[in-house]
Image (cartoon, grey):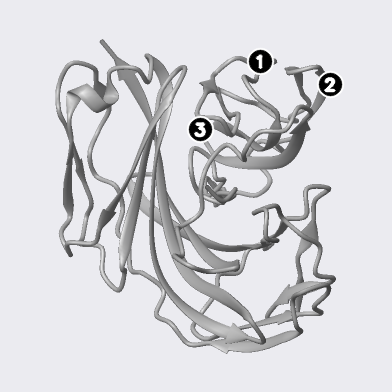
Amino acid sequence: MRKLLSLSLVALAGFFMVSCDEDAAPQTDFEYQIDGKTVTFTNTTQGEVTEYLWQFGDGATSSDQDPVHEYSEGGDYLVTLLARNEKGAKEESKTITIEGGGDNAVTLPTIPGADAALVAVNNKTFSDQAGISIEVEIGSAVAVFFDASNNYVDVGNVSINDNGLDKSNANYYSYYSTGESFSNPVTWKVDGAGEFEAINQEVNLPFPTMGQITSGDVKLGADYELTFKSAISDADSVVIVIGGGNGSYQTVVANNNTNTYTISSADLQNIGTGSGLISVSAYNYVIETFGDKKIGFAHQGNVSKTIQVAQ
């Protein structure tokens, strides 16, 4: 199975919260120390904080200020810290590398038969300010290129709309905007290296339309009705992730153009109680051929919501 990286899942990493009051919201940041597979996180957030929520990239979460987390296998993990107060919330994400191999913790949209995946994501979040729901949408992107053994490979510089992506030591590329979202079309450029030719491609796909998550907290032992303010549209498939205190459930379903999805109690029984996150991604994709390589381009939408998981 190919190793893939998520922007939006468990982490993903699509968990982007932006305050409407830039001066009053926390200035979120953190540091970390790695000892084998154990990571000690030090919270360096500035400002008043009433709630912390960590996503460790492997499905686990924590509401501790300075958590210690042990990973079960090596790999690259996208860690996200959200800090909140009554004025708003901000997040900070960093990729950490745990030695010892292993696949990446979570998955991108599957693009069957593709030798590379280049994904543009619009991450949408909602917050209540004085009784008014505020919607914020921020763009991010990821690109991965596979060799014959399904490992990530270096293909030189990669950009989207002339914004350069950062390359990790594990050879995956990522970009996080400072506030803007993507509109259709977008343009990808790749230098090319090894078996991959240079790419200069305008991708004309609709971005999925996604409404606010309106369902509430999760109660273990009962089915969960995941609902949205409006139906998901302009999407081929939908990825649903529900994370709890010590695990997560993930499923990929065909888009049924509805605003309701039912998750069975059996699927959620092992996610653990405590602070959690619902992250839902919807995407369209197309495959283009460059030389002898099939390149998958995807446009993805993501919405998320913090929740509590209780018995």
| Mark in the foreground, 1 or 2 | 1
Q: Nearer the viewer, residue 58 or 225?
A: 58
Marks 2 and 3, Cα distance to the nearest angstrom? 30 Å
The amino acid type of the residue labelled 1 equals Glu
Label 1, on which residue? 70
Residue at screen point 49% across, 79% down: 287
Label 3, on which residue? 86
Marks 3 and 1, Cα distance to the nearest angstrom? 31 Å
User: Which x, y percent locates residue 107?
Assistant: 51, 47
Sequence order check, earlier mark of 3 and 1: 1
Above or below for 231 versus 285 = above
The amino acid type of the residue labelled 3 equals Glu
The answer to whether 175 appears left or right of 267 in the picture is right
> Residue pushed farthest front?
148
**Crowd class of label 2 (few under 14; some 14 to 19; many from 20; radius 10 Å):** few
The quarter of the displayed image where residue 180 is located: bottom right
Sequence order check, earlier mark of 1 and 2: 2
Q: Which mark is residue 33?
A: 2
Total residue callouts: 3
User: Which x, y percent locates residue 150?
Assistant: 64, 54
